[in-house]
Amino acid sequence: MSDHIGSAVASLALDDDAFIATFEQGGFGGDPFPHEAHLRMAWLYVTRFGAAAAVDRAAEGIRVQAKSKGQASLYHDTMTHAWVYLVAEAGARSPSVGFTEFLTRNPQLRDRTLLLEYYSPDVLSSAEARMGWIASDLAPIPGAPESSVALGDAGAMASVATADYLFQYRQWFERHKMSLRELKEEFRQTDGDPVVKGKLRQLRMARMRKRMMSAVPKASVVITNPTHFAVALKYERGMNAPVCVAKGVDLIARKIREVAEANDVPVVENPPLARALHGTVEIDQEIPPEHYRAVAEIIGYIMRLRGLVSRPRSL
């Protein structure tokens, strides 16, 4: 067998011990390392060593993978930490007997864009996020530290930062220090202060979430995954189609369910429909025609139940 496995997809066919051994030796460096293999790596480390140690080991292993491809600068510290925390939280919430079952119970993790539920693109793509752990700015990541100093970072740096890596990093930083400063200054002058823009973006997101939650009590039904997705729909006679008034994943989904239950809004578990609606309909938009029938059956059933409850008993 060559130093690099011919196809990165083959990594998923290895047993757990062989997968970890190959990963830690940089053996997947010849091809793109698939997202599902990243998840398996995080899951194995979390189940074997716990979340704190998993962060250190994942960071070490991915740096080895990137270096084996001659692309050490591609390593992204915040993304590595965030995915490990999400995998750890999902594993604690739904213990499983194997990786395949774990993915079946947590399909949201297959979505490579899931981190955008927690980070704005500007923050996630920043140099600071790439070089070190940055706390999320849109919604808290379950299990992650609130500060920008992750647990175990010191240990990870001690175990990972070899003399060669430190020397290369120092050279890179000296080469780019002035250009980064100039770039930031130019950005301030042309597009405004990024700190101010970041604060405004946070305020807009907070107002949007508050407005969304205030619409949940007026919803006709909330369709759930049941734990990962929640989509609140409103329908009244005369409307062309039901309208999405709120949607979210994980913590936001749980908050939508809590508000719905507190206001006697029916909560219906339908995992396939909840995932489909969350991915295809935006806030204040009508649901797509392909979901009319499924949603109509649910809302019709709820209306019939309400009619039976409110109808006076005959003597």
Image (cartoon, rainbow, N blue to C red):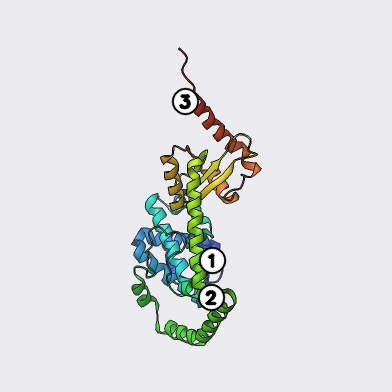
| Gap between marks 1 and 3 measured at Cα | 48 Å
- Where does label 3 land, which residue? 309
- Element at label 2: loop
Q: Please give the label number shown on residue 294.
A: none
- Percent across and percent down for residue 268 are 49, 38
Labels 1 and 2: the sequence-earlier one: 2
Q: Please give the label number shown on residue 69.
A: 2
| Gap between marks 1 and 2 measured at Cα | 26 Å
Q: In this view, does 163 lie above or below 230?
A: below
Q: Residue at x 50, y 85 (%)?
A: 177
Residue 32 falls left or right of residue 52: right
Task: Name the amino acid, label 2.
Answer: Lys
Quadrant containing the C terminus in the rendered view = top left
Labels 1 and 3: the sequence-earlier one: 1
Q: How many residues crowd mark 1 within 10 Å: few (<14), some (14–19), many (20+)?
A: few
Say which of 51 and 250 sits in front: 250
- Where does label 1 land, which residue? 121
Badge nearest the viewer, 1 or 2: 1
- Percent across and percent down for residue 223 are 51, 42
Labels 3 and 2: the sequence-earlier one: 2
Q: How many residues crowd mark 3 within 10 Å: few (<14), some (14–19), many (20+)?
A: few
Q: Which residue is drawn at 44% across and 37% down?
A: 264
Question: Can you tell which quarter of the image residue 58 is in?
Answer: bottom left
- Percent across and percent down for residue 239 are 63, 38
- In the rendered image, the residue lying farthest to the top is 315
- Percent across and percent down for residue 103 are 47, 52
Q: Is residue 254 above or below residue 125?
A: above
Q: Residue at x 50, y 28 (%)?
A: 306
